[in-house]
Amino acid sequence: MSKHSKRELAHKVLDNTVVAPAERIGTVVDETRDLFKRSGELKPGKAMVSTAIGMGLAVLCLLGVLAFHYPQYLTTPELRAKYSVDMLRQALFVALLVSGTLSLVNIVFNRQRNLNIAVFAIVVAAVAMGGSRVPVGNFPDHTPYIGLDWFILDLLGSTLIFVVIEKLFPLYRGQTIFRPEWQTDLKHFTVNHFIVGLILLVVNFLLHHLFGWLVRSDFQQFVRDIPFLPQLLLCVLVADLAQYWTHRAYHEVPFLWRFHAVHHSVKTMDWLAGSRQHMLELVATRVCVLAPLYILGFSEGVMNGYILIVGFQAVFNHANVHLPWGPLKYLVVTPNFHHWHHASDDEAIDKNYAAHYAFLDYLFGTAVKSKNKFPEKYGVVGDYMPDGFVRQQMFPFRGSTKPVEAAAPSDGSAGG
């Protein structure tokens, strides 16, 4: 071999050892970025299901480790006293183990190799930062915080519970988990959880300053003396009456509709769809609904029960779920009932406002009356809402409600 050939060979070897890893990293990054932009079915046999599970767990684990490192800034004070740190450590360890194992198996068998390299790298980073063994000492209270722990727990719990329910009892059988615009709704979900502290601060300030003068301790004591179950049912009724008229105002006052249209722009209903909401609407609705509860002074146990009920129904009633409710459908709000509220069918416009008790809409004459069993389409009439979290937050101030060309139907617009 000539010196010239040897020199070329040396350069090729050098290129492979220096450039190839850089190219591999670039490919891994590009494919990971592309994964989060995709929508549609995860086809079996291509390791996409295990890769998606591994990626989701790895990211949540990394965020969990960060929360362990900075609990004073990344955890919610109201939750710190309620959960077991040891149990969270065990859950974090199991999640790291599952995610790492899935990624390694896929790498060894050359299935979605680049994506699983990214998953394994995230797991390694989480372990290198301390994993489930991060020490938590004393830390100051009353510091500004974002609800990272609430985001992790709620996303993991909601996914495990509601995705399973949707697969067992689907309304639209062909609808995929990663349906169109899921990324936008996940951003809404994330931001709403991260700013939970700010939202609570603003809501509490407004409640005390706007409605504090209406509070009467003797009357509140009378309400607290009501037995738990009837007091809880009364609490839900009071909240839903406030919710009904607030919700109805969003539909009937054009200025308020510009904010509420963000929530109605979802064209595919599932457990994540309810997260799409303008931040100002989120604050305003909470003030309007919690004000009468604050004035009446329901007991702490009843308020905790109400929070569990509203938290479950807010997700469940948007889910891709169909169950035989029987006469119960005239009493409580179900996914079937609330889906009609989100429909853009003519007979569904400005109907089914209640959040908990369906009989309120029958009482006030706003219940949907249709010959069809299920809605034909969802979203705002005219499909004028832009996609993207930031653009939807800006829409009430500069967006147009003029109809645009009909978009292609989503994967949930037909099915049984």
Image: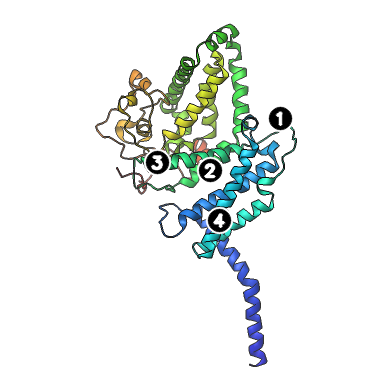
Closest to the observer: 144 or 283? 144
Q: Where is residue 204 in the image (x, y as percent from the top left)?
A: 61, 23
Q: Position of residue 96 (x, y in %)?
A: 59, 50
Disc 4/disc 3 C-alpha distance (Å): 27 Å
- Residue denoted by label 3: 166
Kindly indicate whether the residue at mark 2 contacts the one at mark 4 (C-beta within 8 angstroms). Answer: no
> Residue at coordinates 63% horizontally, 42% vertically from top-left?
89
- Residue denoted by label 4: 101
> Residue at coordinates 65% horizontally, 37% vertically from top-left?
85
- Residue denoted by label 1: 142
- Pick out the residue farthest to the bottom: 2
Disc 1/disc 4 C-alpha distance (Å): 39 Å
- Residue denoted by label 2: 187
Closest to the observer: 215 or 133? 133
Three-letter amino acid code at the position of disc 4: Thr
Earlier in the chain: of badge 1 and badge 4, it is: 4
Q: Nearer the viewer, mark 4 or mark 2?
A: 4
Which label number is shown at residue 280?
A: none
Q: Which SS class for mark 2?
A: helix
